[in-house]
Each structure stands twice: as C-alpha cells, then as structure tokens.
Amino acid sequence: MPLTENKELRLGLKKGSQLSFTQIYELYAHKAFLLSFKYLRNKELVKDAVQNTFVKLWNIYDTIDETHRSSISCFISC
C-alpha cells in the first residue's frame, strides 16, 4: 500500500472511521498474528492478543499521530 494511502488510513482512523479501521486491520492483522505466534506459540493466546491489540487501537484512535508514518505499525508490533 503506498505511503499516501497509509497516511489517509491514519487520518481516517484519527477521525473514527470504521472503514479505515477495517482496512488497517486487514493490512496488519496477519503480521501481528505472525509476530505474536513467534513469542506465544499458542494459536488461542495469539488470537486473543491480536484481538486485544486492535480493540485497544480502536479505543485510542483519537490519540493516533496521523503525521507519523509508522505510528500504527509501531503500536501493533510493540
């Protein structure tokens, strides 16, 4: 996905767009699953961890820095 689209997704998320959130989920969920599985080695725990991460992202959407191009990926992977 081009950088401008990522910026648009960040801006949409900051405004509370469910469509932007869904697109971000589709973009990052698999990567988050793989990263989590690397450490947890349990699919159920990984599913819970990824779900909790995205729930937390939605709960703090208005604090996202839409100008920082890695704010969402950093949030998800940290």
Image (cartoon, rainbow, N blue to C red):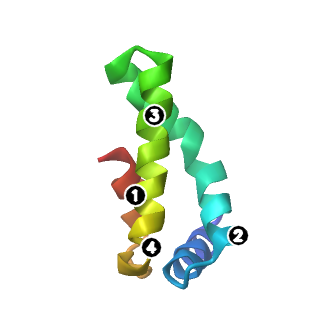
Mark 2 neighbour density, 10 Å: few (under 14) some (14–19) many (20 or more) = few
Q: CA distance from mark 3 to mark 1?
A: 12 Å
Q: Vertically, is 31 above or below 76?
A: above
* Residue 40: % across, % down: 34, 20
Residue 61 badge: 4
Circle 2 SS class:
helix
Circle 4 SS class:
helix
Mark 1 neighbour density, 10 Å: few (under 14) some (14–19) many (20 or more) = few
First of labels 4, 2 by sequence position = 2
Residue 19 badge: 2
Q: Nearer the viewer, mark 4 or mark 3?
A: 3
Q: Vertically, is 62 above or below 75?
A: below
First of labels 1, 2 by sequence position = 2
* Residue 53: % across, % down: 41, 49
Q: Nearer the viewer, mark 1 or mark 2?
A: 1
Mark 3 neighbour density, 10 Å: few (under 14) some (14–19) many (20 or more) = few
Circle 1 SS class:
helix
Q: CA distance from mark 3 to mark 2?
A: 22 Å
Q: Which residue is mark 1?
A: 56
